[in-house]
Image (cartoon, rainbow, N blue to C red):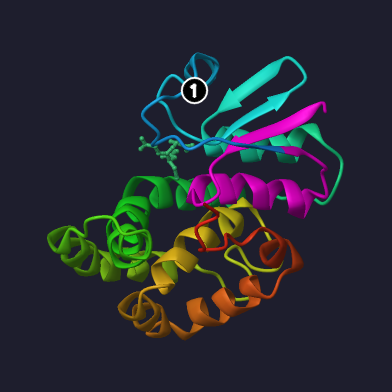
Amino acid sequence: MILSLIGYRYSVYSWIAKLALVEKGIVYEWVETDPFAADLPDQFLTLSPFKRVPVLQHADFSLYETVAITRYVDEAFAGPDLQPSTPVDRARQSQILSIIDSYAYWPFVRQVFAQGVFAPQFGERVDPDALAAGLKTAPAILHVIAALKRDGPWMLGSAITLADIHLYPMLAYLAMVPEGAEMIRQYPGLEHWRQDMAARPAVMETVPLFTDPD
Ligand SMILES: N[C@@H](CCC(=O)N[C@@H](CS)C(=O)NCC(=O)O)C(=O)O
């Protein structure tokens, strides 16, 4: 297989990379790797020095960092364009990606989802302070994201872009906690967008299943 994605089934960033590949219509091989495992193989550590997933391997080219991966996927392969063409739209897309990574990932995923869904489901110790901190921080981030959403079906207006692909998995994880879902409903435009994204075939094909395979 010429193209493979090293990822973890519950990882939000792995989901983003997968979603970009599927939206683009690219066939790839999935290589399951739990980055939280104690005994990470040396080969993975060489490919991912920060011990994170996902990692994309395209023939002898190896790439980590999700934004680099999704941009590469869009630019290196045929298929529908996943990035806008004008400087203003590209800048807005970059801004949204950066906001998501810098300010949304931690409260939405590592605090609200991890403590409100993942830990209880898999019998791990729940940190109620982390959950409360995430629920406290999340509304201000959602407010900014909702304000950046343009009129039209997608974050940047009429065409789906990497802004939608990067945001949806994070918002979907936040929405798995009832308080998170309620926060999103405060912004009807964002809630409508969330439902439209949830109905996309690429999302339905890639959405993680929260059942313990072992
Ligand atoms: N900056 C990285 C972040 C990736 C990341 O944090 N992935 C998580 C899973 S969603 C991970 O590998 N975590 C392992 C850890 O924190 O030790 C990217 O954009 O790809």
Any atom of ligand 1 within 8 Å of the CB at mark 1? yes
Q: Residue shown at 62%/44% (left/top)? A: 17
Kind of residue indicated by mark 1: Ser
Q: Is residue 133 visible?
A: yes
Of residues 150 and 133, which is closer to you in this image?
133
Which portion, as a residue range, is magenta? 1-29
In the rendered structure, the answer to whether residue 68 lies left or right of residue 170 reads right
Of residues 163 and 178, which is closer to you in this image?
178
Of residues 34 and 61, which is closer to you in this image?
34
Q: Among all residues in the image, which is located at the extreme right?
A: 78
Q: What percent of the width, then of the height, locates residue 170?
A: 46, 59
Please, is residue 14 above or below residue 47 in the view? below
Please, is residue 209 above or below residue 199 in the view? above
Q: Picture quarter containing residue 119?
A: bottom left
Q: What percent of the width, then of the height, locates residue 144?
A: 36, 65
Crowding at mark 1 (Cα within 10 Å: few <14, some 14-19, many 20+): some
Q: Residue shown at 28%/55% (left/top)? A: 124
Q: What percent of the width, then of the height, locates residue 188?
A: 47, 85
Q: Quadrant of ligand 1?
A: top left
Of residues 131 and 8, which is closer to you in this image?
8
Q: Is residue 133 magenta?
A: no
Q: Residue shown at 83%/28% (left/top)? A: 1
In the rendered structure, the answer to whether residue 119 lies left or right of residue 166 reads left
Find numbered disc 1 in the image and state the secondary structure of the residue it sits on. loop
Residue of label 1: 48
Q: Among all residues in the image, which is located at the extreme front?
A: 214
